[in-house]
Image (cartoon, rainbow, N blue to C red):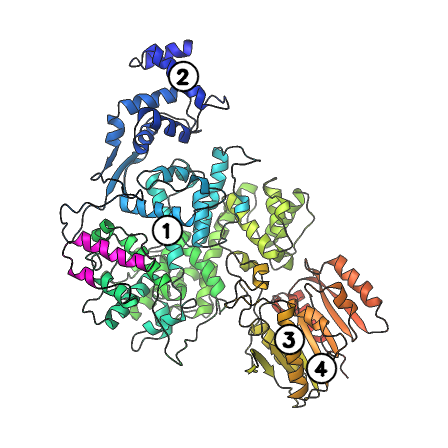
Amino acid sequence: MAAILKLQRKYPQFPQSEIFQLQDAFRKLDVDDKGYLDEATAIKATQQSERQSYDVVRQALKEVGLDSSRRVELEDYVDLISKVRDSSPAQKNLSTGPVRPAGSNGAPTVSHSSRPSLGGGSGGKIQVRGHTGTHTINEDERVAFTTHINAVLAGDPDIGQLLPFPTDSFEMFDHCKDGLVLAKLINDSVPDTIDERVMNKPGKKIKSLNAFHMTENNNIVIESAKGIGCSVVNIGAGDIIEVREHLILGLIWQIIRRGLLGKIDIKLHPELYVLLEDGETLEQFLRLPPEQILLRWMNYHLKNAGWHRTVTNFSGDVKDGENYTVLLNQLSPALCSRAPLQTPDLLQRAEQVLQNAEKLDCRKFLTPSALVAGNPKLNLAFVANLFNTHPGLELKEGEKPEIEDFDAEGEREARVFTLFINSLDVQPAIQSFFSDLRDGYILLQAYDKVIPGSVNLKHVNKPPAHGGEMSRFKAVENTNYAVELGKQNHFSLVGIQGADITDGQRTLTLGLVWQLMRRDILNTLASVAQRLGKRELTDADLVKWANEMAQKGGKSSRIRSFKDPAITSGVFLLDVINGIKPGYVDYDLVSNDPYANAKLSISIARKCSCTIFLVGEDIQGVKHEGEATGKYYQLGDFEVYTKESANGSNEYGILLITDVIGHRFINVQLIADQLAANNYVVLVPDLFDGDPIKLNRPDGFDIQKWLQGEYHKNGTPHLVPQVDPIIAASIKELRTKYGVKKLGAVGYCFGAKYAIRFLRAGEDKIDASYVAHPSFVAEDEFKAITAPLSIAAAETDLIFPNEMRHHTEDLLREKKPLPYEITLYAGVEHGFAVRGDVSDPRIKYAKEAAFLQSGLPLT
């Protein structure tokens, strides 16, 4: 009763009877008798009882003095009802533009009662006041992004029940506070960025998420957004939990933008080659940011359509709808007419343009009002989606660009360094690493961020204000200054001049930026060392610490250096995290797949608020140096790589059966060339019909789906019924065309299975086989061999572990007197014979020794 009297004194506008009624209503909502409600429950209940809109109730709740737990207790609930009924404060703090009636799909409809000027309307601005002041939210963007989230996350097992979010309220923002929606959105834009198994979710283990759970989730969101290249500055987990709408909207846009523009890549769309202008090299074209490529793409189609206009931006040049009308007509003349050009009312014309886009299933992001207002974000998103769906480009016959693979020189490092420099909030952000550093301007900004006060801004040449490139003279002045600053800070820059950076010398540019990044890391370590009372921390100190952390968590894994192959399994990294944060690693999730373990370790580290620029692939596979000298030709339905023997003799031949990376992997070809240099004629068939696994597997890749052919353009599996005929045809080719008298097989990983299968009796029998780190070999395949077998095994191999190796020895022992050997290589892992890091002396030795082991007993 005392509580009721206290409430009545504080809120005299409520009679005592109504206070009792509010208390009863509160208790009914508090089904678990916790003494408080969550914000969502309080808002929904107040909406119904007070017949007010979601946003009015939500804004009123913001003005209630909730503590950091964000729990709505009885007094808070009464205060909320009071503020909603006295709605003027809430209404004043929720200032919107003209009210638009909701359409049938929940989105605002557009009134055509007055014709806007070419400049468009306000774009639906909403003023929202929060703890940090008043911020403007663009209503068109809110509607577009909410609609996008509803579409791409529909049916999600964790949040699907919350969808669709209303597009005419701020409810979507409130559901972002626990991090799940944003994490799912990141994985939609860049699949597999976050291992969702580490996210805190309501369920059996956690009944409802508290502030700590939400903070962990949002740590993952923030660090993962950085990891995919978003500029995440001045936003933290607390900002998301406190639902700071303008920051969340900005983050959502960056995530969506990353997904849309990430697909505008000449590696994915070689047909972009046709957009090169006269005299322009492919290298120059690749320097263009995605936005410029999209503008180039639009102008290409407009020119081919005979249209007199061009576009230079995603705002004023498109908001009258004319260029869109012609573009859509050019992409699909049968579906999209130019009739909108005859419509004088701009909003009506915009609606007709979007109706044309809908015929191409591309009515996304833009509304008529956003189009006419010239909203640059939404127009960019619309055009990017249109390109990704209907590029409308074709290469001419014989026109095929020479495009470097992702693993070309320095590309892996360049990706990490790009994310690092962009995380420093340089302006403009790097799009093309080597090109964007050539004028030194961004590089000098990075210096000033890492070593504050080191750069005298008076000595820095800035790019022209009107756009365009800096003159070479000024660019070299900047890069010379950058090199000089490096030397002043004891960087190892022997033989490097500013002109090398300006000329885009990859190795030298990477070397300088690596030392800048290392200095940034050392700055952090120096502060740690100071707290530990040490002068500095060395690599040996870090290795020792990591081993101690693994041991602290009760694990026995250890590394000797940062090049230790034990790191590549991902397990050691998980053991270190387990020592730092006991209970964070669920070892039920740890598997025999090093790639999956690496991704898991990265996501858990981000959960601890660590900034990680690596992806899972960075912990695996190394490409060797050299140039292949063999040739390709077509053998029936498949391609082969071949190299004739150094002595010209065809007496001895080797069928090299590859791992899943395939016959065009340079490491495999270099091994083939080495075998040929030892007087074997070598044939390497394409086992996968042009569908090998990339050395750096795409996000979300599932090897079982690949084996079943789900990624293949024709659905062709990569199983025994498909591979056996390729092996048989290759054996026949070596025996007949080349006249090989003694034929051996060399099989790696996937290929080892077939090198062993064809040791069986039969016309297509192989005379001897050598295999390294074999995968998926069945017991009956070992039992069926009728010729010598040599196996090179890795000390650490989750696919061919110790127990399987010992069992294989037992099986082969039963085949005596048939010769066999199994050699175990210490300190190496699965894949060492093909993909081992030869910069590590132990791996280099093992790889070379394993190659010598492949000298098959054919004589």
Q: Which mark is residue 23?
A: 2
Q: Secondary structure at mark 4?
A: strand
Indicate which label's residue lies in the foreground, 2 or 3.
3
Residue 410 seen in the figure: yes
Asked whether disc 2 touches disc 4, contact meaning CB atoms under 8 Å apart, the reply is no
First to last magenta residue range: 338-363
The disc labelled 4 sits on which kind of residue? Leu
Up-down relation of residue 54 to residue 417 (above or below)? above
Indicate which label's residue lies in the foreground, 1 or 3.
3
The disc labelled 1 sits on which kind of residue? Gln
Q: Which mark is residue 743?
A: 4
- Return the x and y of residue 157 as percentages of the image width and height: 50, 44
Asked whether disc 3 touches disc 4, contact meaning CB atoms under 8 Å apart, the reply is no
Q: Secondary structure at mark 1?
A: helix
Alpha carbon distance from label 1 to label 3: 49 Å
Does residue 550 belong to the magenta stretch?
no
Alpha carbon distance from label 2 to label 3: 78 Å
Alpha carbon distance from label 3 to label 4: 17 Å
Q: Quadrant of the N terminus?
A: top left
Mark earlier in primary sequence (2, 1): 2
Q: Which mark is residue 725?
A: 3
Q: Residues within 10 Å of mark 3 (few under 14, many from 20)?
A: few
Q: Secondary structure at mark 3?
A: helix
Asked whether disc 2 touches disc 1, contact meaning CB atoms under 8 Å apart, the reply is no
Per the image, the residue denoted by label 1 is 254
Mark earlier in primary sequence (1, 4): 1
- Judged left or right of residue 247, residue 666 is right
Alpha carbon distance from label 2 to label 1: 44 Å
Mark earlier in primary sequence (2, 3): 2
Q: Residues within 10 Å of mark 2 (few under 14, many from 20)?
A: some
Secondary structure of the magenta portion, mostly? helix
Q: Going 27% across and 69% down the picture, which residue do you hit?
A: 301
